[in-house]
Amino acid sequence: HGDALNQIHWKSFARHGKLIVKEYQDEYFVRRALLLDTYAGDLDNDLFEAAISVAASLAISERQNEALLDLMFVGQESYRFTTGRGVDHMPHLQEILSAVQQSDQHSFKRLEQSVNEHIHLCSSLFCVLLHWDTQRQSFFQSMIKQGIPLAIFLIHDGSLIKSDLINAPEHLYLINTQHIAEDLAAL
């Protein structure tokens, strides 16, 4: 008694002879952003290719979590591609990653603006970086202050030690290009 008539499941009533009411509940989809920093500068092209490989590995692992994933990067302009939960398919995301090109030194500022426009949609950030400079440090400090969970994957050629990095957040992981699979598996 008291339920609206449009909430009665009439087919079930016809089958069972008693009123059955449809119940609704809100669904929440976990949505993560995968940021790919495309500015390599004077770094070796192998580091850039390793960053793309790490981003692809993270995207594939997210597919198993039934979450939406927003891949965000900057090329000639800012791009955001969403996959997961029937929105798009992983092979398409892999094609997109295979076509990513290096960008100019101002690209991280454009990526930062794009993230700030869409951060209200995301529950966490995965970030694949090639540099750890003051611009990137301040951006991630602002994300931490906003309470956004994040994991940062800094690609390097074996020359970095985490204790040498200034203002490194807790969830900054160094990924050596000489053993990417091992570093990712250890996480």
Image (cartoon, grey):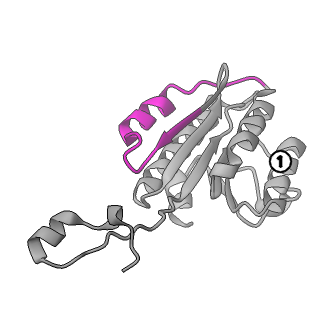
Membership of 154 in magenta stretch: no
Q: Is 131 located above or below residue 124 in the figure?
A: above
Q: Nearer the viewer, residue 127 or 187?
A: 127
Q: Is 19 located above or below residue 25 in the figure?
A: below
Q: Is 75 located above or below residue 165 in the figure?
A: above
Q: Nearer the viewer, residue 113 or 58?
A: 113
Picture coordinates of residue 107, whole percent (x, y): 75, 28
Residue most extreme to the left: 15
User: Which element type, helix, strand or loop, lies under badge 1?
Assistant: helix
Looking at the rendering, which quadrant does residue 64 occupy? bottom left
Residue 105 visible (yes or no): yes
Membership of 86 in magenta stretch: yes
Q: Residue at x 68, y 43 (%)?
A: 118
Picture coordinates of residue 63, whole percent (x, y): 42, 53
Q: Quadrant of the N terminus?
A: bottom left
Looking at the rendering, which quadrant does residue 94 occupy? top left
Picture coordinates of residue 142, whole percent (x, y): 85, 54
Looking at the rendering, which quadrant does residue 93 occupy? top left
Q: Residue at x 18, y 79 (%)?
A: 18
Q: Magenta span covers which residues? A: 80-104
